[in-house]
Image (cartoon, rainbow, N blue to C red):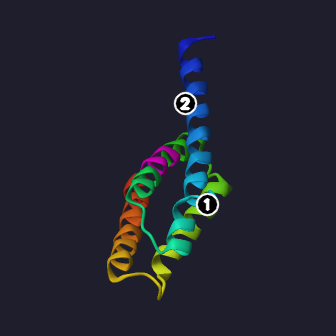
Amino acid sequence: MPLGEHLEKTQQRKGSAAMSRLADRINDDNGFMVKLRMDSRFDLKDYDDIKSALKDVISGWKSDGKVSTEDFVAFLDLIQCLAGGSRFWSDETALMAEDAELELMEIIHDELEL
């Protein structure tokens, strides 16, 4: 197998793994949205992992020329959750969620060059 073809297949596998990692990070039983909705807790480490996974996913979307439905729906749910807020969140959590929603949208716009 030529080196270029091998590198391309490796990158595709990496993108697929990152894609499932994004949806898992958002929707897992102990994931970011569960903690935010159930515990009213904004987990910074999970949020940083989501940002990293999102950037990897976008790279995969660009190289594949298509978007993973699972990840796209999870991302939209996350944006809706962050933008919608909750009356149970502290002022600090609400502000962190608002900032996160804006930052994630900025990442999408910058990485996809919208």
Measured as percent of width and height from the top left, residue 105 is found at 42, 66
In the image, residue 93 above or below residue 70:
below
Q: Residue furthest front?
A: 39
Disc 1 marks which amino acid? Asn
> Can you say whether 28 is above or below 77 in the image?
above
x, y percent for residue 43: 42, 61
**Viewer-side residue, 112 vs 57:** 57
Q: Which sits in the foreground, 43 or 5?
A: 43
* Residue holding disc 2: 11
Q: Is residue 53 positioned above or below 42 on the image?
A: above
**The quadrant where residue 75 appears:** bottom right
N-terminal-most mark, 1 or 2: 2
**Which residue is identified by label 1?**
27
- What residue is at 48 percent from the left and 48 percent from the top? 53
The local secondary structure at tag 1 comes to helix
Identify residue type, mark 2: Gln
Q: Which residues are magenta?
A: 52-57
Q: Which mark, residue 113?
A: none
